[in-house]
Image (spheres, grey):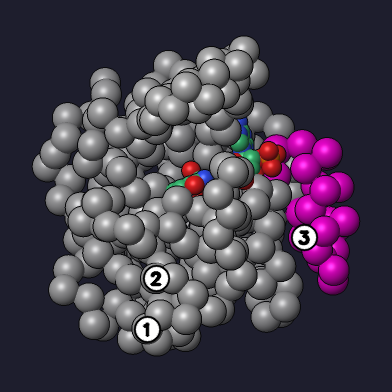
């Protein structure tokens, strides 16, 4: 079955692309610019230029063309917050004064807000997938969608997790098979505290409705998320499910190998979408 991956040049998208190359699966990697295409080709041994498609507008017509002949779609696009450098002196000063919880500010470039990228552009992708005859969509979203006052919802013009959640609901109602994954914080993390981000060394945990948000173990290496994403394509238990995904610390528990086993042991694989209210 041919797979299309959007956001293929992103940090997780490029690992998913590498794994598809390694497993000799038929695929199309969709990126938004020639620059991203060149970056992806340079960083992915064995990837052929013909396997990478540039979609510069990400509108439905362009995407229908990109998705032709694909039975499955992996969505890994996301709005990308930018750090407001002007907020750093205040953060450093607060740290020096021993004040905790003062965070830097973030913003989104014009036309790249969560509403535009995580809702409207993902809706275009879902509509295009239906039109192109895609059968199954794996959507990588984020943990935290049940909490409107979550820190991530306050960045820029805000609500990134709620706009992502709106796209999830749209996918569920599209008629296609779906798998919606809410990973916890992705590793490597840009912050000052460095946690190992190696893949294949951790136990993974599946839950629903942000149950892990209060837990100490609420991160996951992108390498492990990419492996789970790939296994979603071939695991029947993953079809028509939505769940949260985190990892335990390295060396604790049983290292992840099989998504089928992991999902088979889960108590629930359906998040409750009746709350919170989503933006209009
Ligand atoms: N960071 C975290 O801790 C965290 C936690 C939980 C969930 N997540 C979610 O997990 C997923 C993977 O995260 P990541 O950090 O690996 O991704 P990432 O590196 O931020 O990649 C985002 C991708 O989206 C593409 N993109 C952004 N704006 C676009 C636009 N306007 N049109 C088309 N493509 C666009 C980017 O293209 P370019 O490569 O061309 O820039 C890039 O490939 C995302 O959905 C993210 O929100 C992240």
- CA distance separating discs 2 and 3: 35 Å
> Which residue was labeled with disc 3?
51
In the rendered view, does 105 fall on the left or right side of 223? Answer: left
266 shown above or below 212: below
Question: Which quarter of the image is occupied by the C terminus?
Answer: top left
Residue labelled 2 has its Cβ within 8 Å of some atom of ligand 1: no
Front position in the image: 190 or 257: 190
Query: Badge 2, how many Cα within 10 Å: few under 14, some, many 20+?
Result: some
First in sequence: mark 2 vs mark 1: 2
Q: Are marks 2 and 1 in contact (CB under 8 Å)?
A: yes
Label 2: element kind: loop
The range drawn in magenta is: 30-52
Element class at badge 3: helix
Mark 2 highlights which residue?
248
Find disc 1 in the rendering and name its residue: 253
- At 40% from the left edge and 86% from the top edge, which residue is drawn? 254
User: How far from the left and from the top, in percent, is residue 126?
Assistant: 44, 44
Where, by quadrant of the figure, is residue 18 drawn?
A: bottom right
């Amino acid at each position: 079955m041919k797979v299309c991956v959007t956001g293929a040049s992103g940090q997780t998208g490029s690992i998913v692309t590498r794994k598809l190359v390694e497993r000799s699966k038929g695929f199309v990697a969709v990126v938004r610019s020639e620059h991203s295409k060149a970056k992806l080709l340079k960083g992915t041994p064995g990837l052929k230029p013909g396997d990478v498609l540039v979609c510069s507008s990400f509108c439905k017509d362009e995407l229908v063309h990109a998705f032709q002949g694909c039975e499955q779609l992996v969505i890994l696009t996301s709005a990308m917050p930018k750090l407001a450098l002007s907020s750093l002196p205040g953060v450093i000063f607060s740290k020096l004064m021993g004040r905790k919880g003062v965070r830097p500010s973030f913003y989104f470039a014009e036309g790249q807000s969560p509403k535009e990228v995580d809702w409207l552009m993902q809706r275009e992708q879902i509509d295009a997938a239906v039109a192109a005859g895609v059968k199954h969509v794996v959507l990588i979203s984020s943990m935290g969608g049940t909490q409107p006052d979550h820190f991530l919802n306050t960045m820029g013009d805000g609500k990134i997790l709620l706009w992502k959640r709106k796209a999830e609901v749209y996918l569920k109602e599209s008629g296609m098979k779906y798998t919606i994954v809410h990973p916890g914080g992705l590793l490597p993390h840009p912050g000052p505290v460095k946690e190992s981000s190696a893949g294949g060394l951790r136990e993974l945990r599946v839950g629903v409705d942000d149950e892990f948000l209060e837990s100490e173990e609420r991160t996951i290496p992108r390498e492990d998320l990419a492996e789970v994403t790939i296994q979603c394509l071939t695991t029947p238990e993953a079809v028509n499910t939505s769940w949260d995904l985190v990892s335990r610390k390295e060396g604790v528990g049983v290292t992840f190998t099989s998504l089928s086993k992991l999902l088979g042991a889960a108590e629930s694989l359906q998040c409750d979408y009746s709350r919170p209210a989503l933006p209009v």
